[in-house]
Every structure is written in structure tokens, then in C-alpha cells.
Amino acid sequence: MSGMIGHPRGLRVRLGLVLALSLTLTPVPGPSTAAAVAATGRDAATTTLPAALLPAWNGGINLYRKGVFTTQKTWLWCTAAGVQIVRNIVERDDDHSTSGQRRYFEWMRKRNRYDLPETAGVDPQG
């Protein structure tokens, strides 16, 4: 296939991780927001902070913290490791367990759209 960069499975994994991140990440109020809500007594969703209370934005966001990254436990569990990383970010956890990755992989395999051999991993629906 001309114009295709990399391996299709690698693309699927990257797209799946991006989708997982976009579906699971929600804004978390920081200390400035909490202080403003406490001071005004208003709900965080309706609170507008003065620009002076907001940190300067450099155009990026860093979700990394110690304990977030995990390595896939088998060559096949790349999507499971991705789920584990996303859960570590969102849940503020530090799970690096083989059993967790196995559980995520089995969960995704049961939801595959296509009847793939296990060596094919999971499809986008899974």
C-alpha cells in the first residue's frame, strides 16, 4: 500500500491510545480553582477565574508523573499496557501488574468485532 507509514497494527494501537486518552481524561480542578470555588461558593463548572490566578500556558500539557508509565508484559499486550498507563494517569494509580494487563487484554479480546487469532491481538472495537 503506497502512502502507508509504519505497520497498520502500530497505527491502530496509537489511534486507540489517543482515543482512550480523549475519552477518559477530564479536567481536574487545581488549587487555584478550588480556592476560587471556596471563596465564591459557586460550582467549579460555573466558576470563571481571573486571568491573574491562572498559570501562563506554554501551549502544551504534561500528564506524566512518576509511576504512570508501564512496560507491556508480553509482546502482544501493547494495548493493555496503554490502558494501564491511561488508568494510572486518570485514577492517579501506579499499577504495573501483569495480572492487570492480562485482565485488560482479555476484556478487549472478548469485545473484538472480528474472530481474530490471539496472536493478532485486539481489533479497534475490542
Image (cartoon, rainbow, N blue to C red):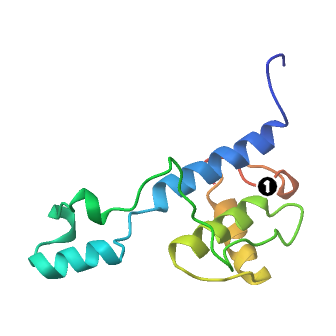
Asked if residue 47 is positioned above or below residue 13 in the image, the reply reads: below
Q: Nearer the viewer, residue 106 or 22?
A: 22
**Residue 27: x percent and y percent?**
38, 64
Q: Please state the horizontal and vertical placement of residue 12, each as a whole percent of the image.
A: 71, 43
The spot of residue 23 in percent (x, y) is: 47, 55
In-front residue for pair 14/77: 14
- Report the residue that reaches farthest toward the left: 41
Q: Position of residue 52 (x, y in %)?
A: 27, 61
Residue sitting at x 34%, y 78%: 31
**83 left or right, relative to 96:** left
Quarter of the image for residue 110 reads bottom right
- The amino acid pointed to by label 1 is Gly
Quarter of the rendering containing residue 85: bottom right
- Residue for point 66% across, 71% down: 84
Comparing 61 with 50, the one in front is 50
The C terminus lies in quadrant: bottom right
In the visual, does 106 lie left or right of 117?
left
Residue 113 visible in this rendered orientation of the protein: no
Q: Secondary structure at mark 1?
A: loop
Q: Which residue is mark 1?
A: 121
| Residue in view at x 85 percent, y 72 percent | 73
Looking at the image, which is closer to me, 33 or 111? 33
Q: Is residue 34 visible?
A: yes
Identify which residue is drawn at 78% across, 60% down: 78
In the shown orientation, is residue 50 left or right of residue 41? right
Left or right: 126 in relation to 48: right
Residue reaching furthest front? 52
Indicate the quadrant containing the N terminus: top left, top right, bottom left or bottom right: top right
